[in-house]
Amino acid sequence: MPGLDATQIRRKLADARLYLCTDARTERGDLAEFAEAALAGGVDILQLRDKSAGAPLEARAELAALEVLGEACARHGALLAVNDRADIALAAGADVLHLGQDDLPVSVARRVVGEHVVLGRSTHSAEQASAAATEPGVDYFCTGPCWTTPTKPGRPAAGLDLVRETAASGATRPWFAIGGIDAARLPEVLAAGADRVVVVRAITEAEDPRAAADWFRTRLRG
Ligand SMILES: Cc1ncc(COP(=O)(O)OP(=O)(O)O)c(N)n1
Ligand SMILES: Cc1ncsc1CCOP(=O)(O)O
């Protein structure tokens, strides 16, 4: 299946509302089946983020899992995202590379992945969000965690004030709220001014991932 070009990727990013990070689910069932369900439910961007063993996946295992996710994303017209590693993003033909504050500088990642891959940045304060909103080469950013979360141990909550401040800043790049967001909390996140979210457990731990994704999609698309 041919990949998306730079214009198609940026259009899809602009339209994206629901971003899911998943682990490779090696012990909890079939990754292909899970991806199929989540994407059928309405996930727009699917990232492989596997810290389940307390260390990153080995490169071969990461590439193998990304191949599975990439096939599912292509069938559903969704974007495939890689966390942290520019080399893996390039090798996997990913559409998106997500970078934390301690990961590669954007200019360096850009040199590795080229122009068509979109680059995202994590932010945890108004200063970081403001930098990500203007730094050349950043295509989107995430603010959070809104709440402390076992998915990101040791990272204190930035709270909904950061979402409010980001919404009030008039940022023109797409930005997503992240961290501790579930069905019960989504209304608060939307009321704080976010219209895009990243979730992990709300879908990865759902009994019915398709129904969980569909629930978010319905609320985020209005
Ligand atoms: C979409 C998205 N947003 C935030 C993160 C977190 O990235 P980072 O701060 O680098 O932390 P780790 O994921 O590396 O633990 C993300 N991965 N994806
Ligand atoms: C990767 C990451 N970065 C900030 S919060 C977070 C994890 C969010 O996971 P969950 O949706 O399960 O709280």
Image (tube, grey):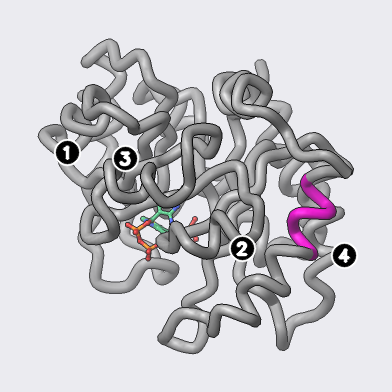
Q: Earlier in the sequence, mark 3 or mark 4?
A: 4
Q: Residue at x 42, y 86 (%)?
A: 54
**Image height check: is 140 above or below 26?**
above
Instruction: Find out whether residue 72 is within the magenta segment.
Output: yes
**SS at mark 2?**
strand
Q: Quadrant of residue 41?
A: top right
**SS at mark 3?**
strand
Q: Is mark 2 within 8 Å of ligand 2?
A: no
* Badge 4 amino acid: Glu
In three-dimensional space, the C-alpha distance between marks 3 and 4, rounded to whole angstroms, equals: 30 Å
Q: Is mark 1 within 8 Å of ligand 1?
A: no
In three-dimensional space, the C-alpha distance between marks 4 and 1, rounded to whole angstroms, equals: 37 Å
Left or right, 183 with reference to 167: right
User: Residue 33: which disc?
Assistant: 4
* Badge 2 amino acid: Thr
User: Residue 143: which disc?
Assistant: 3
| Residue 128 at x, y percent in the picture | 16, 38
Left or right, 128 with reference to 117: left
Q: Earlier in the sequence, mark 2 or mark 4?
A: 2
| Residue 183 at x, y percent in the picture | 59, 44
Q: Residue at x 54, y 84 (%)?
A: 58
In three-dimensional space, the C-alpha distance between marks 2 and 1, rounded to whole angstroms, equals: 25 Å
User: Residue 128: which disc?
Assistant: 1
**Image height check: is 181 above or below 14?**
below
Q: Are marks 2 and 3 in contact (CB under 8 Å)?
A: no
**SS at mark 1?**
helix
What is the crowding at mark 3: few (fewer than 14 residues within 10 Å), some, or many (at least 20)? Answer: many
Q: Which residues are magenta?
A: 68-73
Q: Name the magenta segment's main secondary structure.
A: helix
